[in-house]
Each structure stands twice: as C-alpha cells, then as structure tokens.
Image: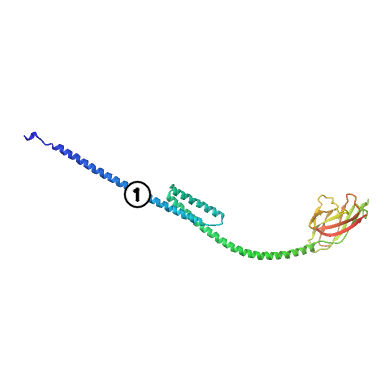
Amino acid sequence: MDQSNPTPEPRKNRSNTVLLVLVVLLLISNVVLLYLWSQKSDQAQTTQTQLTQVSSEKENVTKLLEDMLVQYDTLSTDNEQLRTEIEAQKEKIKGLMDQVQRGKTDLFKVRKEAETLRKIMQGYVVTIDSLNQVNQALQAENVATKQQLGEVTGQKQALEAQSAEQQALIAKGSVLSTTTISAGALFLRNSGKQVETERASKAEMIKCCFTLGENRTTMPGNKTLYMRIIGPDGSVLPATESDNRFKYEGVEGEFSAKREVNYQNQPVDVCMFWTATGKLNGGQYIVQIYEAGTSVGKATFDLK
C-alpha cells in the first residue's frame, strides 16, 4: 500500500527556509560592511583634505609672517621710542612663526594677530613719514635760522663792541677825582685839640683831607671811600677792623680806613682819619684814596 512509504516534505521546506535566512543575513552583512567601508573611506578622504588645507594654510600664514617681518625690517627711524616698539613687534612676529612651525597654535588666531600687526606697521609707516617731513621742515628752518643767527650775531658783535666803547667812556667819565688833597700826622692835646706834627715820636693819628670834584656822569648816592696808608717800610698800616680787605685796580689788598660819603654830583669836602696803635717810624708815608676800585687821589708826607 502507498501509506507504508511517506515522503519527507516538511523537513525539506525547513532546510530551504534556513538557507534563505542565511542568504538574507549574508546580504545584509555585506551591505553593512560596504556602508561602513564607504564611510571610513569618506572620513579618510575628509581627513586628508583637512590635512592638505591645514598644510596650505600653515604655508600661507608662514609666508604672511615672513613678508611682514621683511616689511618691518625696512622701517627706519632715528626716534628711539619708535625703534624700541618696532623691535618688540618683530619679536612678536618671530614668536608667531615659531608657534606655527611647531603646530602649537590656532592658525586662524595667528592670521588675525598678523593682520593686527600689519595695521600697527602701517601706523608706523605713517608716523615715520610724518616725522621725516617734520625733520625736513626743521632742517630747512634750521638753515634759515642759522643764516639769520649769523646776521644777528654779526650785528650783536658790532653792537657789543660799540657798547663796550660807550661803557668804557661812561666808566671813565664816572670816576670821581679830587681837586685838592693833603695828608699829615697829628697828635692830641689834653684839651682834645688836634695839632699837626712832623715828628714820628709824637704822631698819634694820620689825617687826609680832600675835595671830591663835581661829576655829572656818575650816579649820585652813598660812596664808599677807602684810604690806604703805606709806611716807610712799604707795608700798609692796618685798619682797626678785622675785615680790612677790598678790591682795587684789579687786585685785592688791605685798607687802613674807610668812610661812607653822600655824593650828589657836587663838590664835597671829606676828611679821613687813621689812629695809630703804636709808635710810628720816621720816613715818607704815602696816602691813597680809592672809590669803586679806582684811585681818586694821592698825597705824601714825611715824619722825622
């Protein structure tokens, strides 16, 4: 009978299904692998493109910095402050170049800083140009000033020479002089009367009287008169005051006595006295009167 040998139809169908599933899974895995490989290839290509762009940008930025450094080197100025600032900017550029070469900086940031340095450099160019124009104007003005100064100096020297001559004439004309002068020794009586003497042993004082003549050129007012008495031994008889030095005829020496006289350009009679502190020697005595460092009179007398 036919029922004794049945065919295995369900088992065959199951095998076909498993095979179909495996084929589908294989196709899906291939599609996934193909997609992943495509993505990775795109990423590699993108990375390569980025590296190329970075390398190109690095070269561009480096070239920009190099060109700018050359431009900074062309800046020349005598202004010390500007020179210092320019050197500082050049050091910044060198620092940026070093960072770019080592790849330790943001190229976009470096490019922005380079543009800032370029603007600063353009400002230096304008400033240096302005300074050069000012210097040229000053040099031209200096030449003109020197010419004018030479003319003024010549005029000044001529005026100074003329003024010196006038001053010399005025100084000469303003010197006081004596119209009469006499000197001698005195001794005092018990009554206080002054008596002239020619004997050295009796002399206690020396007196010099004179008349200052009229002089309209000199300035009126108080005049300081100095009297120098030179003894027979050539020494100056000392004044009683400790500070007894004055300048006369270009030198400094001692005076024996001094006196203030109010002079109003009119003749005035004056007497000056010197008191001895010891015994006087016999011989000739010279009496000199000075005012404003110039001799105005001289007299001599002898003691026996």
Up/down of 102 relative to 181, above or below: above
Instruction: Identify the image quadrant of residue 213.
Output: bottom right
Q: Position of residue 114 (x, y in %)?
A: 46, 53
The one of 244 and 154 positioned closer to us in this rendering = 154
The one of 97 and 219 positioned closer to us in this rendering = 97
Left-right relation of 74 to 173: left
Residue named by callout 1: 46
Residue lying at 50% horizontally and 52% vertically, measured from the top left: 90
Residue 292 visible in the shown view: no
Q: Position of residue 102 (x, y in %)?
A: 44, 47
Left-right relation of 198 to 48: right
Which colouring convention does the figure follow?
A: rainbow
Q: Position of residue 258 (x, y in %)?
A: 83, 54
Residue lying at 40% horizontally and 51% vertically, measured from the top left: 55
Q: Is label 1 in a helix, a strand or a loop?
A: helix
Residue 37 visible in the shown view: yes
Residue lying at 84% horizontally and 58% vertically, measured from the top left: 289
Q: Quadrant of the N terminus?
A: top left
Left-right relation of 192 to 294: right
